[in-house]
Amino acid sequence: MPLLVLLINVFLLATTILADDESNWQGKWFPQPPNAPDLNDRLPDIIEPKAPPMGEIDPACDDGKNNLTMDYDPKNISHSIVHMCLDNYTHYRPNYNIEPVMRIYKIPLAYSAQHRCMNQNISYPENIPTFGPHRALWPQYGEYLYVPVQRWIHSLEHGAIVALYHPCAHEGLTKKLKTLVKSCLFRHIISPSERLTPERPFAVVAWGKSMEMSVIDESLVREFIRDNARKGPEITHRDGQYNEQLIEAAQIISTKDDENLCPPPHTESNKV
């Protein structure tokens, strides 16, 4: 038999055997079985709205007024428990023997936090997160009855300082923290937070860094603000668009850019 004919017969036999093996194969195929339709170009059944650029009001994604239930809905009375003390106040008494805890996170320079629409859940692994995905609209600066973490994370990105206190925290120390932060800079958010612990019911937060405290040490808080304010990756003095349950709008202390952080009181440097 000529060599060419022999080779052709061997090829046909091998092809037949492989075809039989394929028809009897019960295992998995990678990436898909033979002759299966290509699903790579198939559109999803639900097309998620694309998150808008920073600060752009988009009713289909986030307008700061509607569809707020995913994070915190101020119109829903059942959500109000997040800013109410439902525990024993005595568990949150100040303890001068408990040292403050500083948490520092190494955030890659290339990291870019995503904007997510109001139909997408945002959760954080840390009790007090300092970076991460957030809503497209950030809060107007000032003190709130309550502002959800998914909002104030965006403020950190702009170089703001967020001051948090547990709803059960000592009333006098809570007032002290509020007064101190308000006197230091324009870009601040003040809100109660149920994420704090009884041991350290106060915190000041910046992009990538937080300090949790049992008592308010004014010098430590000022040092934290001076060292960490205006350090976010997207620095801007633009005020936010979200203002649900805003109690007191922030005042300019030195300049809109907070060029002089925590200026001495009763001087021209902190008057505008």
Image (cartoon, rainbow, N blue to C red):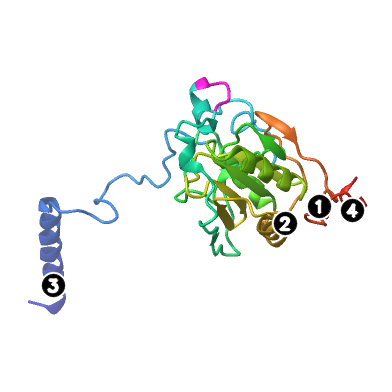
Q: Earlier in the sequence, mark 4 or mark 1?
A: 1
Is 7 located above or below residue 251 in the figure? below
Q: Is mark 2 on a helix, strand or loop?
A: loop
Are the residues flagged by discs 3 and 2 in contact, CB closer than 8 Å? Answer: no
Name the residue nearer the viewer: 127 or 20.
127
Drawn side of residue 48 relative to residue 172, left or right: left
Disc 3 to disc 4, how far (Cα)? 98 Å
Give the number of the disc on residue 230: 2
User: Picture coordinates of residue 189 (x, y %)?
Assistant: 67, 42
Q: Residue at x 58, y 52 (%)?
A: 113
Q: Mark 4 points at which residue?
A: 269
Query: The disc labelled 2 sits on which kind of residue?
Result: Arg
Q: Which of marks 1 and 2 is nearer the N terminus?
A: 2
Q: Is mark 4 on a helix, strand or loop?
A: helix
Q: What is the residue that sits farthest to the right in this orientation? A: 268
What span is colored magenta in the figure? 73-77
Drawn side of residue 125 relative to residue 205, left or right: left
